[in-house]
Amino acid sequence: MSPEELFPEVSPDPAAYCCDCGRITRAPITVRYVLSSSGPGTILYACPGCFPRLDCGPTPEDVIRKT
């Protein structure tokens, strides 16, 4: 693993896509971290307008169902 992978460059002007409305926001709020079975996980962000109606807890996709 290279130093660039261990310490990624952080932009002084953060911007991210909102996981609810899909628009780019300059004030991203971390909603949750999605684990990946191969490689690093993904952080989901929300814009300040969508954040109050989002839940950070597990979603139906996260629940392991018994068959």
Image (tube, rainbow, N blue to C red):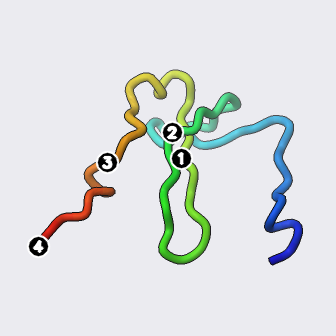
Mark 1 or mark 2: which comes first in sequence? Answer: 2
User: Which labelled disc corresponds to residue 31?
Assistant: 2
Mark 3 or mark 2: which comes first in sequence? Answer: 2
Q: Measured along the vertical axis of the image, is residue 65 above or below residue 2? A: above
Secondary structure of residue under mark 3: loop
Disc 2: CA contacts within 10 A as few (<14), some (14-19) or many (>=20): some
Which residue bears the numbered disc 4?
A: 67
User: Which labelled disc corresponds to residue 8?
Assistant: none
Q: Which residue shows up at 82% across the image and 47% down it?
A: 10
Which residue bears the numbered disc 1?
A: 44
| Kind of residue sitting beneath label 1 | Leu
- Measured as percent of width and height from the top left, residue 27 is found at 67, 28
- Measured as percent of width and height from the top left, residue 35 is found at 49, 62
Mark 3 to mark 1: distance in Å?
Answer: 13 Å
- Measured as percent of width and height from the top left, residue 25 is found at 64, 33
Mark 2 or mark 4: which comes first in sequence? Answer: 2
Q: Which residue shows up at 57% across the image and 50% down it?
A: 43
In contact (CB < 8 Å): disc 3 and disc 4: no
Disc 3: CA contacts within 10 A as few (<14), some (14-19) or many (>=20): few
Mark 3 to mark 2: distance in Å?
Answer: 12 Å
